Amino acid sequence: MIGRKKVVMSFIMAIFVLAVPSLATTNSVEVSDLNDINYKGWLKEEIELSANEEIELGNYTLNYIYPQSGGTFVVGLTIQEKRTDGAGNERFYQIADFSGHEDIFGLKGKVIFIERSSLAFRINEVENGDLNLTVWSKDDIFSDVEISIDVPEFVQFYKDESVDIPLKINNSGSLDEIFDLCINGDGFYSYEFLSNGYKVSKINVDSGDMDNLNLRLHIDKNCPAGDYNLSVSASGRSSDTLYLPFSVTEDLNTTSDPELKMQLSNLYVSGEAGSEIIVPVRVLNSGNVELENIELDASSPGGNWDFEFSEDEIERINFEEYMNVDLRIRIPSETENGDYFVDINAVSGDVEADEMKLRVNVKSSSNSVWIGLLMIVLMIAGLVFAAKKYGRR
């Protein structure tokens, strides 16, 4: 059953509407024996009118007047259309009027076209003060939705903030409808629609009713500060779109506290002279703001030590995140045994990490040991040979 907007009319008002010709210029009508209208693009709905009830269908009103007890026996169906007059004012003009019990019954089962309008109808039943109609229209006069919001014109959100925004969905059409809910706009947010505390993606609104729901909007913590505009839409047979402009700013209650740290899995490593060792280094953004263009460097304990990072510069690290890099250290072959310290640091603009010291223990390479032993053996062999040769003399 189609929902409707009810206005109870008194008998005096009914007589007034019928009796005042200045309200309207009644259009001529065409009565047809058609059972249905199959014209392409025409829409059809079943409408029920109770006694002394008026309903709105787009720019049209249908008013069924039925005698109340104690009143004069007058039955009538009046159709009005909202138009704009020469002064720019909207007024309802009567475009058709069917009066009298016999007239109403005589039209039963016939399709009535109203001249210079996009409207046609058929009276199906007249019973117990109720009027059942089939209405056709070239325009969708049966559905109408409006979405509204009760917030200031200019609103401001902070990064990483969640806010509930109250919405109203008003179905002023003559049909019960299910509306799909959607948001479009720049992608620095997440959202959900809530109805009575439950997440929803659709909402059912009966004809003439208005439902409330909340739009819960969460601004991303990395959303750039600036102005934004979201569109909130409710779409069914009819649809409406609401635009929500807002600005995003830094949370003034949260001070900017950039901080950069480095971590080493081991503070002590060892290697042979002339060898190459790889040391994992973790670069950590432990502050509350994003860091960019992070440069890495290592200081040599000697002029001929060689260092190479897998990435000399890190483009960006979000706050509370980290990046792992490898530091390749080449130890000169002539380095003597002992402990050496390598200074490792990282800097992003004015933010500098505390310097890390890596202890490198250097040992002689195995080749050097063997060469030394070979020289000793050769020296001993030479001494033995000399003793034998010159000792006989």
Image (cartoon, rainbow, N blue to C red):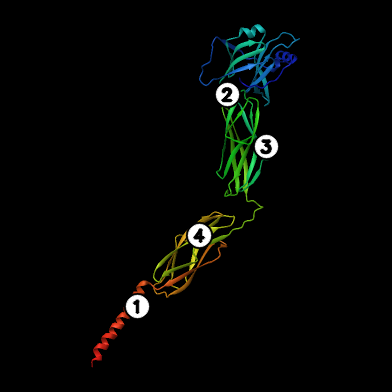
The residue carrying mark 3 is 150
For numbered disc 1, what is the local secondary structure?
helix
Q: Amino acid at mark 3?
A: Asp
Distance between the Cα atoms at labels 3 and 2? 28 Å
Q: Does 64 sit above or below residue 384?
A: above
Q: Position of residue 71 (x, y in %)?
A: 75, 10
Q: To which quarter of the image does residue 143 belong?
A: top right
Nearest to N terminus: mark 4 or mark 2: 2
The residue carrying mark 2 is 140
Nearer to us in this view, 185 or 51: 51
The residue carrying mark 4 is 282
Q: Nearer the viewer's eye, disc 3 or disc 4? A: 4
Distance between the Cα atoms at labels 4 and 2? 64 Å
Q: Amino acid at mark 4?
A: Arg
Q: Nearer the viewer's eye, disc 3 or disc 2? A: 3
Q: Position of residue 5 (x, y in %)?
A: 66, 22
Quarter of the image for the C terminus: give it. Answer: bottom left
Q: Is residue 52 visible?
A: yes
Nearest to N terminus: mark 1 or mark 3: 3
Nearest to N terminus: mark 3 or mark 2: 2
Question: For this view, does 143 lie left or right of residue 6?
Answer: left
Q: To which quarter of the image does residue 172 belong?
A: top right
